[in-house]
Image (tube, grey):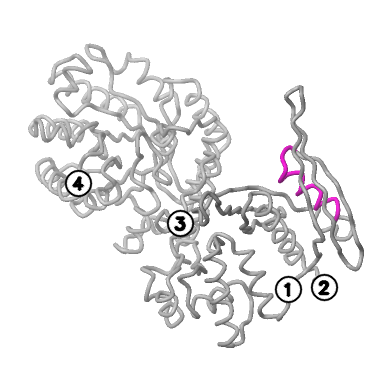
Amino acid sequence: MTETRESSELDDSFHVFDTTLRDGAQREGINLTVADKLAIARHLDDFGVGFIEGGWPGANPRDTEFFARAQQEIEFRHAQLVAFGATRRPGGKAAEDPQVRALLESGAPVITLVAKSHDRHVELALRTTLDENLEMIRDTVSHLRAAGRRVFVDCEHFFDGYRANAQYATSVVRTAAEAGADVVILCDTNGGMLPAQVHAVVSTVRTDTGARLGIHAQDDTGCAVANTLAAVDAGASHVQCTANGYGERVGNANLFPVVAALELKYGRKVLPEGRLRDMTRISHAIAEVVNLTPSTHQPYVGVSAFAHKAGLHASAIKVDPDLYQHIDPELVGNTMRMLVSDMAGRASVELKGKELGVDLGGDRELVGRVVERVKERELRGYTYEAADASFELLLREEVAGKPLRYFRTESWRAITEDRPDGTHANEATVKLWAKGERIVATAEGNGPVNALDRALRVALERIYPELAALGLVDYKVRILEGRHGTQSTTRVLISTSDGKGEWSTVGVADNVIAASWQALEDAYAYGLLRAGVEPAE
């Protein structure tokens, strides 16, 4: 493994240890290929974590291949790669244990060993004695240290074990430290602890053993981040986390809010200079690799983390953004967003216009018209907080004093045909006017909305070749509350991309096809606006 570690102000006094590639991969729905693991490792190194736990070499072919390829393909600038494994088997010798040998053969400069620290787990899971478990820890740590490896020891089920038998759990920590482990990590494996409990145990164990301690917290009580910070308050100087909190059951301590809290709230420098501003980008990039939609409401990095909807908030933010934000979002690579809804006031619209690059010129009457129009349309079922493109079109229409039209629809229709052989046919016809020309176009699709989309494209691409770059990337339907007996209103949200960015548009009608047509019209109009095309009418 080639290392070109950059010099920085960081030292070894505090560790940010990422275990996404092992613990994070245990989340239901995540199945990482070797290529995925290499990509995530590069992102984590770019972010600046100190240690990246790559997996368990020898336990499965995928992890073994990862370590072999990582040595050849990744030049780590900030992180050290860590191999994970267990202490030797009961009754054996570490020097002869094949699993221990695989850890050395991985080439990783750092090895994390999992050790039992709960007496019942030793006796029931390992089926050995308490004394033999201590000898397994001592022998394995000493052997790896003699081979030139740095060793961390994860004390599995430590907090539950401490509650059951504090003397034995403490002896595990003491044995690991005396054998040469640089850090002994106290693991809340079942995730059942609360911050005050974690603080008390870490403080006591640190005093009783003098060992350097770390924390590994699962999130089963929703307290993993808080428990991690409580351990730091108690003297832990090594935090184990996963990107976006991925992990088994409900997950692990989330790397990003832990790091942000340490840097911005504690004033502790744990990343190389300037890397914190990449946090939002790294979070979303890793979500893309594991094929999970980024959580919109994740602290610090979610797209809604600094989104403001209430008119009262907007009025204050217009004066000073810090009045309703605990940090400047740019510190973590995020941005403030104003959401426009029926809760919006004048300040919300003015700030949203500024965000979208629309000059409202301090026109209070104009802003008032926009506010009232938004409230009236949201009463009918529209939503603009999830459809910025539709709102921008509405805003620009009010500024211009006329509709923003690239084409005018005469009529459209969509037909779905069920055939005797069980197949279906979907056909759409649109009739519209563009640049003084009447156009009639027909197309087939794999559904009525897809057929309408294709027919609209056939009709307009000759006149507006810029539309060739557009593609529909997401489609959502919501049946709203019925207002007249069994009659319901349908809302459709469409996300469209031109390969450079995405935008969302909304349509509302008493049937899904009509609502879809409205959203499609806005999507095409906004795409042309983005492309710099002047409206035709």
Comes first in the chain, label 2 or label 3: 3
CA gap, disc 2 and disc 3 = 41 Å
Q: Crowding near pointer 4: few (<14 within 10 Å), some, many (20+)?
A: some
Location of residue 249 (image quadrant) = top left
CA gap, disc 4 and disc 3 = 25 Å
Q: Crowding near pointer 1: few (<14 within 10 Å), some, many (20+)?
A: some
Comes first in the chain, label 1 or label 4: 4
Q: Amino acid at mark 2?
A: Glu
Residue that badge 4 annotates: 194
- Horizontally, residue 435 falls left or right of residue 482, namely right
The number of discs equals 4
Q: Position of residue 32 (x, y in %)?
A: 51, 32
Q: 142 or 408, which is in the foreground? A: 408
Q: Position of residue 119 (x, y in %)?
A: 14, 24
Residue that badge 3 annotates: 301
Comes first in the chain, label 2 or label 4: 4
Q: Position of residue 495 (x, y in %)?
A: 64, 53
Does the magenta portion include 458? yes
Q: 317 or 424, which is in the foreground? A: 424
- Horizontally, residue 91 falls left or right of residue 72, namely left
Q: Secondary structure at mark 2?
A: loop
Q: Position of residue 22 (x, y in %)?
A: 41, 33
CA gap, disc 1 and disc 3 = 36 Å
Q: Amino acid at mark 4?
A: Leu
Q: Residue furthest front?
A: 485
CA gap, disc 2 and disc 1 = 8 Å
| Badge number at residue 537 | 2
